[in-house]
Image (cartoon, rainbow, N blue to C red):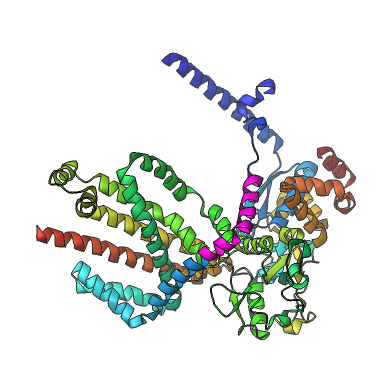
Amino acid sequence: MGPFNWLLTFPSALTIDTGPIVDDAVASLSRAWAPLFSLMGNALLGFVNSIQSVVDIIPWWVMLGIVFALGWRLTRRASRGAAYAFMLLIVGILGLWELMYITLGLVISSVLISLAIGLPIGILASGSRRAESLIKPALDAMQTMPTFVYLIPAVMFFGLGKVPGVIATTIYAVPPVIRLTSHGIRQVDKEVVEAALSFGSTRAQVLFKVQIPLALPTIMAGINQTLMMAMAMVVTCAMIGVKGLGYEVIVGINRLEIGRGLKSGIAIVIMAVLLDRLTQGWFSAGDKLKEKDE
Amino acid sequence: MRNDIKILIVLALSISLMSSAGCIGGNLAKNEKPVIVFAEQGWDSVRFHDAVAMFIVENAFGYGVEEVGGSTSVTYAALLSGEVDVFMEMWTDNLAFYDADVADGKIIELGTNFDDNAQGLYVPRYVIEGDAARGIEPLAPGLESVSDLRGLKSVFKDAETPGKGRIYGAIPGWQVDEIVYRKYMLYGLADDYCYFSPGSDAALAAAFASAYEKGEPIVGYYWEPTWLMGKYDFILLKDAPYDPELFMEGGCEFPAVPCTICVSTKTPGKAPDVVEFLKKYRTSSEITSKALAYIADNRATTEDAAKWFLREYEYVWSGWLEEKQIKAVKAAL
């Protein structure tokens, strides 16, 4: 090797030790802006707690009824609705009903926040090429960055518990709704848009009365994916002190109690499948209604 | 033009191929002896002890070394199966089946690495004494023992549960978590406080460190030796003296937990001389904390800390090795 060492191994002269800079920045930021962060944290906590209290009001038999009725209506088959309700019943039989409610409350909160952020950004990205070219790499980074990398700074800023959990879930779950909203609006037939414009519609009218309604199936698919991504974060969030089904998985794994982990794992799968089928059924039911109209 | 690029690519590929072939050849020649696999269960003190032992095993005994990371339960399963050779720091109290597995001969306990550690409920010193330099008033000047926590819920507020305080529990799944929880029930703290489970040790460390950096009050389970306790000034709350009868109910302080060194059943056949060396390996909680503080203060790697230890504490480690091996270690430093 000798003199040509630098050809084979990356020259150490070119490395920069960036770690300490970021460490110090996070530490001083969390100190200096502590009041702001606690204000934001408390607002977020209030929101999550109010969603949670709405979920908690629903008695178990009403929840089973809702799932049965939704399943029946959306698939037009009573047997499907009964199957869905039975799956939910299994969660109760496993003794995980309350934990499921906690997880459900957190997932719903994260999804609502994701939609509040994601839908406007998606619409913005669909209208402007420059906005899209800025947003796309950011979304790629959010989806591939290992979660713990931003989970721990979130803990430094907001403390342990639901708040950093919801923030981390939102970071992870928001990309699909942005991507598919933008994609859906873009793929609306240009001639339809031109027709609407030539009839004297304003830009806003074109957007809200033509483009978004036509893009709705794609946008709904994005919302469905966001929901699934939020479910996927349940276990990760348990590692920063969020209670619920994910926490049971962590305890089970840490103690090598495989049965305990599997039980809550199954409950998470059931929750995810039901949320997926019911939201999907909702979109396709919408499609069917539209077909009828035509 | 195209051809030039092709030639360049072929040249670059062949250079890198030759160099990697050279490396593999070199490794094979060097590693006639098997590779000793050390478990890294995810905390700093075990990383430090791994680094010290790996440095010695590699340089004094000539084995290849490898460190495999994972949670305690995952690496422990690997130790049982023989995929991992060495646990440098087995927190025997945290594994419910440890004693049974040693008795059944599923793993081999070689000796104790250190047994002067501490754990329990900690608060930052400024909560009790204040810190004039940082402008922090003492919020709980009378706080001395765990039972004093009653009536102090307004100091250690829980944002998620208005009207209650928050006590950070141990890591879910660790056996101490149950003991700390029973202590919390036994001392009547349940009326005033939520028992908040931190979910993971990284999250617990982040909660403690960020509270300390902001000068906020916090109370919760922690343990020594850790970089956190080496770097920040925390006080262990007093508790009733250790009594084996009361311990599992949480009625007394934590005794020092023996942190043992264990190997898999396959290791003695693979590397008898390494097993002999590990039998003599013994440090202390104090040395470990100092090494971890060295890492935190200098942003050093564990290898740096291992070399620092080998330079500073020759009187500790020279007893573990024979004359020839000591020379080899010194030469490698």
Q: Position of residue B307 (x, y in %)?
A: 79, 45
* Residue A203, image x, y percentages: 23, 47
Q: Please say if B270 is above or below B29.
A: below
User: Residue B226, located in which quarter of the rendered image?
Assistant: bottom right
Judging depth in this view, the residue of A60 and A87 nearest the camera is A60
- Regarding residue B283, the answer to whether it shows in the image is no
Q: Residue at x 63, y 30 (%)?
A: A9
How many marks the image carries: the answer is 0
Residue A81 x/y as whole percent: 25, 73
Whether the magenta-drawn stretch holds residue B249 is answered as no
Q: Is residue A25 magenta?
A: yes
Q: Residue at x 88, y 49 (%)?
A: B314
Of all residues, the one furthest to the left in this rendering is A294
Spot occupied by residue B318 in the image (x, y as percentages of width and height): 88, 50
Q: Magenta segment, which residues? A: A19-40
Q: Quadrant of residue B192?
A: bottom right
Task: Say which of B105 and B164 sits in front.
Answer: B164
Q: Quadrant of the N terminus of chain B?
A: top left
Compared across the picture, whether A204 is left or right of A95 comes to: left
Camera-side residue of B60 and B176 = B176
Q: Dominant secondary structure of the magenta stretch?
A: helix
**Foreground pick, A38 / A83:** A38
The image shows residue B213, relative to residue B241, as above or below, that is above
Q: Is residue A17 above or below residue A255?
A: above
> Which quadrant of the view contains residue A288?
bottom left
Q: Residue at x 54, y 57 (%)?
A: A151
Work out whether residue B329 can be spotted: yes
Is residue B224 toward the left or the right of residue A62 in the image?
right
The C terminus of chain B is located in which quarter?
A: top right
Q: Is residue A183 left or right of residue A294?
A: right
